[in-house]
Image (tube, helix red, strand yellow):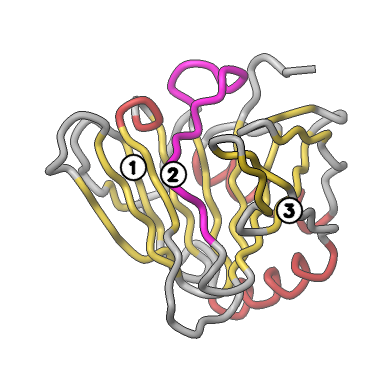
């Protein structure tokens, strides 16, 4: 069951399947969800080690999922929290729109322009081959960057709007890396919910 709604735009990037709905949630609904999640999620400040040095990860995170599932990236391990009513409702909306089922959601809180997510791919082994990532953006619009792993000319940048849904499927996580870069502009907070399906839990 992979029926896409007509409101998705296929962004047409080579060697990838990236679709976008800029108005998945209406403005008022997006604002209400942002306020609810900002307050109810017990945000975590994780430490990350890069080249032998340990830093605070430049954003706050939390994991939700089915049946205390576990998930890790970059040496950071999570045991999933139970779906809250708001998170469960968003998950059901995303599943209905995309036709895919998800069993975890990594939530990210970007407090200001100095919070970011560096170049990476969501290709953890427990997601299996060709993972589908559905990404909801709430709050401040931020630019999303994609770059092809081999063809240096295939680089793309576009804004993720408040209330938008980005869907990455097919080979995307194997052929591209993506990031949300820092900005020196004075901007408001953003919440990003990335729904995934763990095939083989790392527990």
Quick one: label 2, few (<14), some, or many (20+) residues within 10 Å?
A: many
Outermost left residue:
153
Give the magenta range.
116-131
Magenta run includes residue 164: no
Check disc 2 and report the residue beneath it.
167
Identify the residue under disc 1: 18
Picture coordinates of residue 10, whole percent (x, y): 28, 46
Q: Where is residue 57 drawn, in percent x and y?
A: 64, 52
Helix, strand or loop at label 2? It is strand
The answer for how far apart the CA atoms under marks 1 and 3 are is 23 Å
Quarter-of-image position of residue 29: bottom right
From the image, state whether disc 2 or disc 3 is nearer to you: 2
Q: In this view, does 120 lie above or below 158?
A: above
The residues bearing labels 1 and 2 have C-alpha atoms spaced at a distance of: 6 Å
- Say which of 190 and 99 sits in front: 190
Q: Residue at x 56, y 39 (%)?
A: 50
Tell me if residue 13 comes above or below residue 9 in the rendering.
above
Q: Disc 3 designates what residue?
A: 89
Asked whether the beta carbons under mark 2 and mark 3 sit within 8 Å of each other, the answer is no
| Marked residue nearer the N-terminal end (2 or 3) | 3
Q: Are marks 1 and 2 in contact (CB under 8 Å)?
A: yes
Residue 117 is one of the magenta-drawn residues: yes
């Amino acid at each position: 069951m992979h029926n896409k709604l007509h409101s998705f735009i296929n962004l047409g990037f080579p060697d990838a399947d990236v679709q976008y709905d800029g108005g998945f949630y209406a403005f008022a609904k997006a604002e209400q969800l942002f306020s609810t999640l900002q307050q109810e999620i017990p945000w975590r400040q994780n430490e990350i080690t890069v080249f032998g040095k340990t830093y605070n990860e430049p954003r706050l995170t939390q994991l939700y999922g089915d049946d205390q599932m576990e998930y890790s990236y970059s040496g950071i391990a999570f045991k999933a929290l139970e779906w809250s009513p708001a998170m469960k409702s968003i998950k059901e909306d995303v599943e209905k729109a995309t036709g895919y089922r998800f069993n975890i959601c990594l939530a990210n809180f970007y407090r200001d322009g100095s919070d970011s997510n560096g170049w990476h791919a969501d290709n953890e082994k427990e997601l299996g081959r060709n993972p589908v990532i559905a990404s909801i953006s709430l709050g401040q619009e931020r630019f999303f960057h994609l770059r092809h792993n081999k063809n240096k000319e295939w680089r793309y940048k576009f804004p993720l709007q408040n209330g938008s849904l980005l869907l990455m499927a097919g080979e995307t996580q194997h052929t591209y890396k993506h990031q949300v870069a820092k900005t020196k502009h004075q901007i408001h907070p953003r919440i990003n919910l990335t729904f995934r399906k763990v095939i083989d839990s790392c527990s």
